[in-house]
Amino acid sequence: MATQFDPASGTRDLLAAEVERRERAFGVIRAVFTRYGFEPLQTPAFERLDVLLGKYGEDADKLVFKILRRGEHEASGEADLALRYDHTVPLARVAAAYGSRLPSPYKRYALGPVWRADRPGRDRYREFVQCDLDTLGSVSPMADAEVLCAHYDALAELGIGEFQVHLNSRRVLTGLLDAFGVPAALGPGALITLDKLDKLSPGDVAAELADRGLAPDRAAELVDAIAGPGAADRIRDVLKQNAEGSAGLDEVDQVLSLVAPQVPRGRITFTPRMVRGLSYYTGPIWELTAPGVAGSLGGGGRYDHLIEQLGGPDVPATGTSLGIERILSLLPGGEAVRLQRLDVAVTVMHGRFVGQCFGLAAAARSAGLRASVYLGSSGKLSRQLKWASDQGARWCLIYGSAEDEAGTVTVRDMDSGEQAAVPLAEVGSYLARAAESR
Amino acid sequence: MATQFDPASGTRDLLAAEVERRERAFGVIRAVFTRYGFEPLQTPAFERLDVLLGKYGEDADKLVFKILRRGEHEASGEADLALRYDHTVPLARVAAAYGSRLPSPYKRYALGPVWRADRPGRDRYREFVQCDLDTLGSVSPMADAEVLCAHYDALAELGIGEFQVHLNSRRVLTGLLDAFGVPAALGPGALITLDKLDKLSPGDVAAELADRGLAPDRAAELVDAIAGPGAADRIRDVLKQNAEGSAGLDEVDQVLSLVAPQVPRGRITFTPRMVRGLSYYTGPIWELTAPGVAGSLGGGGRYDHLIEQLGGPDVPATGTSLGIERILSLLPGGEAVRLQRLDVAVTVMHGRFVGQCFGLAAAARSAGLRASVYLGSSGKLSRQLKWASDQGARWCLIYGSAEDEAGTVTVRDMDSGEQAAVPLAEVGSYLARAAESR
């Protein structure tokens, strides 16, 4: 039940276990991207309204969080800023702002939250992290293959199971429509319908194509050719005589050949019916899926004119977007994992000894361990040991009257329950050795 | 000059060198906090408007970025959400939402952007990172000393020069006002004036106190006692007979004694005239400053009732806030540092060899190195070597017709210019060895 203390609708508070789980995954992804020579770019959370609006159509504009003008202008009820909707529009702005001061090609990744006023639901948030990898300024198929390999490596290193790469080319699709006599004007609509082949039956798709104005028999032939097993070989055959289609097949084959040493055979296939919804792609396109997971784990492709359409310079571009929230949901659970906050928990048995206890925690930290004194008000050892255990501490230090007299500290191994009396001055080195030998 | 491609007023695009400089510093800070057993908390960028407004007074409310309602409600011109103004209000909300499901005490840090519609200026941004460290649920002076030590360690490990810790207690100040006969009603105002002793002359401060209603001679005595050298000893003397003041001195002495093994003598001093502007502090307070740096590097103190005032539960609390943007500005420059994007740059001398070249980059990455092929369109070696040099690459790999015939790769050391012919299959291990020996 929602309470007044819940975060705003569609947003989440991330407590420690979840933050650590996410940051660990982000660290793996950053390391992979860095290894490929991609560099980070961070843009502000909000942009001027005119930068954001009108870039992705009216439906997207409705999902933009707009920020009210401030001061005397607040009463106008008008907005002048808006929260980032994706990482691509800011990339186009940065490319325009920096021009030749950016490296060429500009290989950048963006990993950070975006905000969309979608209806919140299970695993659908209004604040969620998006992770994009793009190369601006290269027409080479190596640039396409590179982002694809980096995407693949990131999923592989995160330990996502048996995911699959589906590869196609927009030019293959254009050639295909041409070969089946689909009028150019019907092309975009036909692609939207073909994109539904993973949800609808081939018959339904053919019917929808006919509704769009295709001759019913051509529609059925097209769907027969593109759907089902053996499609890749059939399509290769069909496109032999089609210039655009052949060029698309060359793109597909180039990418397949470039990624071959990296991506195992059988993990990547030419999938003619894979369309990628968005209309801005111009060359190779790909999508990553995992068995049993609805939707994709991300995907991308070449989009040679989009940066200019978004207000940036006219540069060729290729990129991939990782479906990061879905990927995170596939990784081992966060809250379920017991959080180890401390290596060393220091009990405080008496107010007289706070100085020594505080110093013991400092000594443990100097040995590179995570350590804290007990900050509660109970003087009972059992209560403090429970705290130490809740913190996941490996050792608990006890310093009471007996220890004070003997000049020692009792070091309790929280797993075995064994205790050792260690001279006060040697606790740091004792713990460092103990940590090394575990 | 501002252009249409600049980020919104008061915000910044952070390119690679700056991102890396900042993330390096954040990494140091997180490591220190973790070593103290503090855990991360991430709250959403925006909160419901009622959670944020009215918490810090009207002036602060004016600086809140408000988000327009969406859909059919957009036309109302009303806001229902607002961007996070600080990390303390969200902490109070989380403490209320999670209650006893949080660890007790709850030791958390928050490191992330906040947004304030301040007038932008040099080093003053509307989107800036705030870094807070707080302990909820402990009345122990060890909790105060712990956040102070963690703040100290973070600055020390970042390599900030000769910074100073100024320690005081709100109870010392209360006792002091009492000892000098300042009526309770004038107390808060008097503290605001005393806080100006680092900007105004003692005479001006005394005059302002008199304006506030203090007897001019008492005002002059108070300023004489609190300002200038020897103040700490004088104040200790004055407060001997004052219960509240003595209790404050005990707090100061407890913290001084607890931090003594960690914070070198001379780096921390009892500074009676240090007030900390905000009125919510209830116990020990501190501020960190560096010579030659205007303002502070952060500070904090005990604030036992604030969480409740902000809508959270009634828990004792203590915390510190690092002036992170100022600290970042003191660290070695970002853009000035030459960015090393790659360890290995692979030239592409001919379209025939793209497969081999792409594979060479993959081999270098398998050896743990950052590697990329040349993605540009020039076939000239000199141009590609310049690209390799711009990327900061340590080695450049060349694979042309001669190498193809010999089955080798030319590995060029970019520092010495020396070249070696390495068999194709051995490039990965060759580079791994070379990287190790550097």
Image (cartoon, coloured by chain):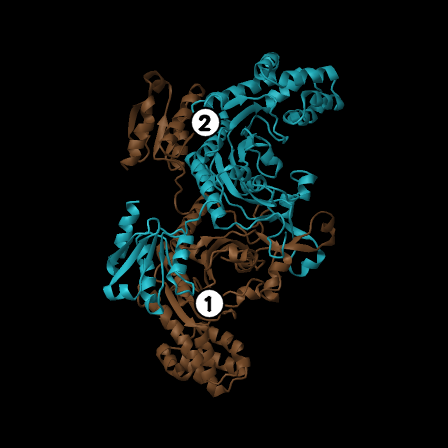
Chain colours: A brown, B cyan
**Residue A64, image x, y percentages:** 60, 59
Q: Nearer the viewer, residue A18 or A100?
A: A100
Nearer-N-terminus badge (1/2): 1
Asked where in the image residue A89 lies, by quadrant, the reply is bottom right
Do dots 1 and 2 share one subunit? yes
Alpha carbon separation for disc pair 1 and 2: 63 Å
Write down the quadrant of residue A149 in the picture. Answer: bottom left
User: In what element is the residue under mark 1?
Assistant: strand
Q: Position of residue B387 (x, y in %)?
A: 41, 57
Give how far across and how far down residue B91 sits, in percent. Answer: 55, 40
Q: Give the residue at mark 1.
A: A302
Q: Which residue type carries mark 2?
A: Ser
Q: Please say if A231 is above or below B237.
A: below
* Rendered view: B256 above or below A195: above
- Give coordinates of residue A42: x percent, y percent: 51, 51
Q: Nearer the viewer, residue A229 or A244?
A: A244
**What is the quadrant of residue A322 in the picture?**
bottom left
Given residues A331 and B155, the one toward you in this image is B155
Q: Chain of mark 1?
A: A
Read off the residue under disc 2: A378
The answer to whether residue B180 is visible is no
- Number of other residues with Cα within 10 Å of mark 1, as a class: few under 14, some 14 to 19, many 20 or more: many
Q: Quadrant of the C terminus of chain B?
A: top left
